[in-house]
Image (tube, rainbow, N blue to C red):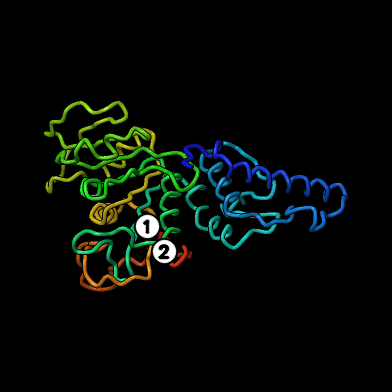
Amino acid sequence: MVHNDFLTCGSGNRRYLHRVGQRRMMRRLILRGGAMPSEDQGDSAEPLGTLEAWEWLLALRHGTGVAHEELSTRVDGHWESTCPVTPDATELLDCWMPLVTQTPWVIAQLGQSMDGRIATQSGHSHYINGRESLTHLHRLRAMCDAVIVGAGTACADDPQLTVRHVSGQHPLRVVLDPRGRVPDDLALMSNASAATLHLIGPDVERPAPPDHVSRQRLGLDAQGQFTPQTVIETLARLGHRRILVEGGGITVSQFIDAGCVDRLHLLVAPLLIGSGRPGLVLPPIDTLETALRPTARRFRLGDDTLFDLDLRCT
């Protein structure tokens, strides 16, 4: 089932509310001097899991003020819990707290092999990463206001850029298309499940888009591209302050090279492709002293490894 709003997420949310209700009943019993429920009274003592942790993170991100009796935010921006938390939920909370407690931000993501490839030479990339990494990508979409892709990725992959594998709201889908080459039959242009912003160059002529697509012209640099800073400033004026640069490798590299990315989520699969399209392509450097050395955190995503790189701390 596809859920667009974390407040109405079907049977998963009912299970979440049921468990929250059980914990609240147990907490009241303890606070009033009552006895702990016995094992044959159900799963009242079940540790807090990923579903509840994710719903709490979404509530923080949207500022809904939804209270949770077991989870809270400390003054230093970290989380704390008055009940046991599963290892998976612990990693989820640790991973996402920097994004829900800070704004604005720009985050980029790449899914790649261990030798730094995001596709084969022919462009085949489905799928380098596993199911858990795909879920992580959908969580990134749910956390951001706008998700950016370049025209090459839009044409090659025909992505929907919506939130389907987790609960959450769809972001604004932004297509960087300076030459106006993205066709109208792609999902971003024809599927009205989410709004799309089509950014084109000043001389591009296109027919009027469908109602869910808005179109805006931006100036180009000497290479015929949008500058990343101009794109971010354009989105900020529209009220979008949490931005995900999803791909492809060229677009992510341009935003990082321009110094416009706060964090990079690098999803590395235990796979060796040997040749093919690289992920990051940055200008050459002469010595390692000038290499980027960001602060890194590691999280497990099934067989994959997520490197959360803080590019502001290099």
The type of residue carrying mark 1 is Leu
Which residue is identified by label 1?
264
Q: Secondary structure at mark 2?
A: strand
Q: How many numbered circles are shown?
A: 2
The location of residue 214, given as percent across then percent down, is 28, 30
Q: Is residue 202 left or right of residue 39?
A: left
Residue shown at 70%/54% (left/top)? Answer: 82
Specify few, some or many for label 1: CA neighbours under 10 Å numbering under 14, 14-19, or 20 or more. many
Of the 4 image quadrants, the one containing the C terminus is: bottom left
Which residue is identified by label 2?
307
Observer-nearest residue: 313 or 180?
180
Are the residues tagged 1 and 2 within 8 Å (C-beta)?
Answer: yes
Residue shown at 20%/72% (left/top)? Answer: 286
Quadrant of the image occupied by residue 240: top left
Quadrant of the image occupied by residue 170: top left
Residue shown at 28%/59% (left/top)? Answer: 125
Alpha carbons under labels 1 and 2: distance apart: 8 Å
Q: Secondary structure at mark 1?
A: strand
Quadrant of the image occupied by residue 173: top left
